[in-house]
Image: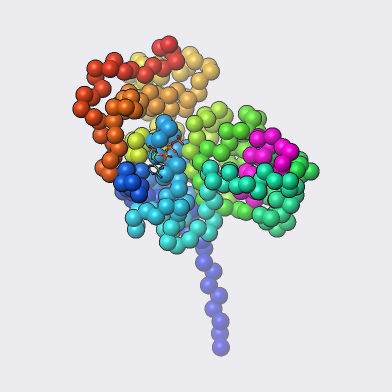
Amino acid sequence: MSTTTTTTTPPAPSVKTFDLTYTFADRSAGVSHISLDLPPRSRTLLIGANGAGKTTLLRLLAGKRMAPHGTISVGGVDPFTDGLEGVTYLGLEWVLNAIVRTDIGVDELLRSVGGDYYTERRDELVSVLDIDTAWRMHAVSDGERRRVQLAMGLIRPWTVLLLDEITVDLDVWSRAQFLGFLRRETEQRDCTVVYATHILDNLAGWPTHLVHMHLGTVKAWGEADEMLKAAEEEAEKRKDELSLIGATPGNSRLGMLVMRWLRDDLQARGPRSQHQRGPEGWSYRAGGLGGYGFEPKMPSDM
Ligand SMILES: Nc1ncnc2c1ncn2[C@@H]1O[C@H](COP(=O)(O)OP(=O)(O)OP(=O)(O)O)[C@@H](O)[C@H]1O
């Protein structure tokens, strides 16, 4: 009798959505008609104002909410129905996990998530995140706790990492080291990162792709370099504030593009009291926006 060994190559960790629409239990729209195709090894930034739908999208991608059949493919599978092997989602509920506030040692915590098995990754993360393994978790600062949590979440080699702004407590240096680690991961392994953040420090040159979300929709997405170049050319033509990029050393091209997106979004949406969200998305109440003289300003206008 002969035996055949079949080796299955795991599917490449792309992240795709096909006209994804999700409605909350209260029938309000979460996200509407989102189609994305983020390739393996990409590092995508999800950008959008508060309430734009970033967390909702990440939770759908993580299989934490049930999307309509056939509208999401993460690494070739539906994350809700086909399981989540290799997909790591680090968001608020993970941050709030009570165990990291108890009188427990870092070594013990890291061991509990595979630290003794993935020793190289553990040691690298301990070094990158500047963790003292002698810390007791009830007696560390918020930022120190966050660094241990990040190490815990990243020790197992994920293929798709979905990050919902969880670096707020990190000091600038630690965050830069952490971003460098993620970049190396995508350069050295077949893995993909989608990261929702409002903090643009040290992100210039980091993302391969940008996704601009607004009121539950994707307004624009694509390769970061192309989008930044197009924005710069557009700004040159319009002679608006983005043309000042070169003369504004404190602001990166990415920072200025995001500022403009958010300013335009706010202008388009208007004050919160003037709109409402239904199953079909956002709509504006009678009266519109015009009479309010509402015009958000760029810092350079102030
Ligand atoms: N469980 C829910 N039921 C109904 N509406 C919800 C629910 N969760 C979120 N929303 C609404 O969906 C919209 C998008 O929320 P989401 O948390 O995805 O935004 P976000 O882009 O992540 O915002 P932020 O930058 O503030 O984290 C918001 O208007 C929010 O009020």
Between residue 149 and residue 248, name the one nearer to us.
Answer: 149
Judged from this view, the residue extending furthest toward the left is: 286
- Left or right: residue 68 compared with residue 199: left
Q: Residue at x 48, y 61 (%)?
A: 83
Judged from this view, the residue extending furthest toward the bottom is: 1
Q: Residue at x 43, y 32 (%)?
A: 50
Q: Is residue 20 visible?
A: yes
Between residue 7 and residue 251, name the one nearer to us.
Answer: 251
Q: How many numbered marks appear? A: 0
Q: Quadrant of residue 278 in the image?
A: top left
- Left or right: residue 262 compared with residue 166: left
Q: Quadrant of the N terminus?
A: bottom right
Between residue 23 and residue 170, name the one nearer to us.
Answer: 23
Q: Position of residue 57 (x, y in %)?
A: 41, 45
Whether 167 is among the magenta residues is no
Q: Is residue 220 visible?
A: no
Q: Position of residue 264 (x, y in %)?
A: 34, 24
Which is the main secondary structure of the residues drawn in magenta?
helix
Q: How is the image coloured?
A: rainbow
Q: Quadrant of ligand 1?
A: top left
Q: Position of residue 284 (x, y in %)?
A: 25, 30
Between residue 142 and residue 240, name the one nearer to us.
Answer: 142
- Left or right: residue 248 compared with residue 143: left
Residue range highlighted in magenta: 137-155
On screen, 302 above or below 201? above
On screen, 196 above or below 120? above
Judged from this view, the residue extending furthest toward the top is: 302
Q: Residue at x 34, y 36 (%)?
A: 215
Q: Residue at x 58, y 43 (%)?
A: 95
Judged from this view, the residue extending furthest toward the right is: 134
Q: Quadrant of the C terminus?
A: top left
